[in-house]
Image (cartoon, rainbow, N blue to C red):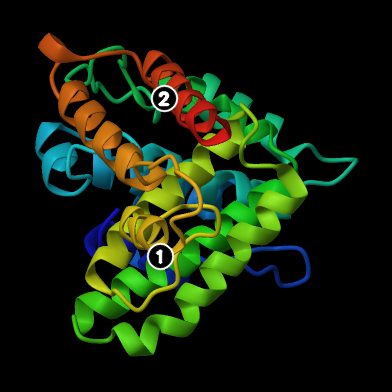
Amino acid sequence: MDAEICKKFQNVREWLPHELIEGNYKNIDDDRLKKYCTNNCDNNLDKISAGCLYFFDTFFKDVSAFEMAAKSNINTVEYILIWLSYMLNLIKTKENNSIDSFYKTYVKDGDKYTNNINYISGYNCYKDLIDRNDYFLSMDMSIISKLYDAFNTLCDMYNELATNNSNCAKCLEKARQFVDKYEKFNIDHNINEDNSYSHVFLTLLIDYDNLKKKCKNFPSIPGIINENSEQRSEVTSGSSIAIKLIPILSILVAIAIFLGISYKYSLFGFRKRVQKQYLREKIKNIKKRMNK
C-alpha cells in the first residue's frame, strides 16, 4: 500500500460514495468512471462494476500499470475486493442477492473482465483475480464492513502523510483508531485463527507497520512484542530468562516483500494460494515460538 494507491480509492469514494440514497448509489458524473458504465450505469450493479473495472484497469491493465500503479504488489487485488464486497453487501437483501447477480451478469457472462493479464503467473484475466479470491464475496457483512473501515482509515493516513510527511501528529488519532479497530476485530473474530479474513487483516497490519516506521509516535499493535523493549526488560528484571522474539510484523513485512518480488514475473512466480499457505505456516511457527 502507498499514497498513490490510496488516492485512487479516495477518488472512487468521491465519484461513487459508499452511501445509499433511498436504496440507490448516486449517479456517476465523472467521465473517468463513466467510460466503464454498462447501460449508462442505470442501476446499482452497473455503477459498482464501473468502479471495479476502473480499479482493475488502473492497477492490472498491463505490465506498466502493474509495475507503476500497483507497485508490482498482487495484494492490491485484496483492496479492490474489500471495496467490491462492501459495496455489493450494502445493497444485498433477502429478495436480491446482489453478489450472485453481479458475478453472473458481469464477471462470468460479461466480456469486460476478460482482459489479458498473463504477465502475472497463474492469472489470465480480471475474472481470475476475483475467482482466486472469491472468499471476499462470501464474507459476512459484519466482517467485511470492519475490514473496509480499517482499510479506509489506513488510506486516510497514507494520503495525509503524502501531503505533508511531517503530519505524524495530525494522524496520531487515526492511528489510535486503527489500533482500536484491530483490537475489536481480534476480540470478535480472533485474528490468530487460520481463516481468510484474518489473513486480510494481517495484510493491513503490515501496511500499518510501514506507516509506523515513518511515525514513531504511532501506537504499537497490542500483542506485538518489541525486541528492544524486551531486551530492556531482561536487563532490568534479571529474575528470569526471557525468550527473545522477532517482531511478528517485521517477519511479515519481509515475507510480503519476498513474495511480491517472487510473484512479479512468471519465471519466479508462485500461485497466490501457495503464497498464502506459506505465510500462514510462518505465522503458526511464530505463534509456537511465542507460546514456548
The image shows residue 277 at horizontal and vertical percentages of 45, 17
The image shows residue 215 at horizontal and vertical percentages of 28, 74
The secondary structure type at the circle numbered 2 is helix
At horizontal 20% and vertical 29% (from top left) the residue drawn is: 258
The image shows residue 196 at horizontal and vertical percentages of 59, 30
**Quarter of image, res 90:** bottom right
The secondary structure type at the circle numbered 1 is helix
Asked whether 257 or 160 is in front, the reply is: 257
Residue 128 lies, with reference to residue 112, above or below; the image says above
**Image side of residue 228 versus residue 4, left or right:** right
Asked whether 160 or 42 is in front, the reply is: 160
Residue 236 numbered tag: 1
Q: What's the CA distance linking mark 2 and mark 1?
A: 31 Å
**Amino acid found under the numbered disc labelled 1:** Thr
**Image side of residue 106 versus residue 209, left or right:** right
At horizontal 70% and vertical 47% (from top left) the residue drawn is: 143
Circle 1 crowding by C-alpha within 10 Å: few under 14, some 14–19, many from 20: few
At horizontal 18% and vertical 37% (from top left) the residue drawn is: 72
Instruction: Tell me if I can see residue 126 in this picture.
Output: yes
**Amino acid found under the numbered disc labelled 2:** Lys
Circle 2 crowding by C-alpha within 10 Å: few under 14, some 14–19, many from 20: some
**Quarter of image, res 169:** bottom left
The image shows residue 83 at horizontal and vertical percentages of 52, 51
Give the residue furthest to the right: 94
Instruction: Tell me if I can see residue 38 in this picture.
Output: no
Q: Are marks 2 and 1 in contact (CB under 8 Å)?
A: no
Residue 99 numbered tag: none
Q: According to the image, label 2 marks what residue?
A: 282
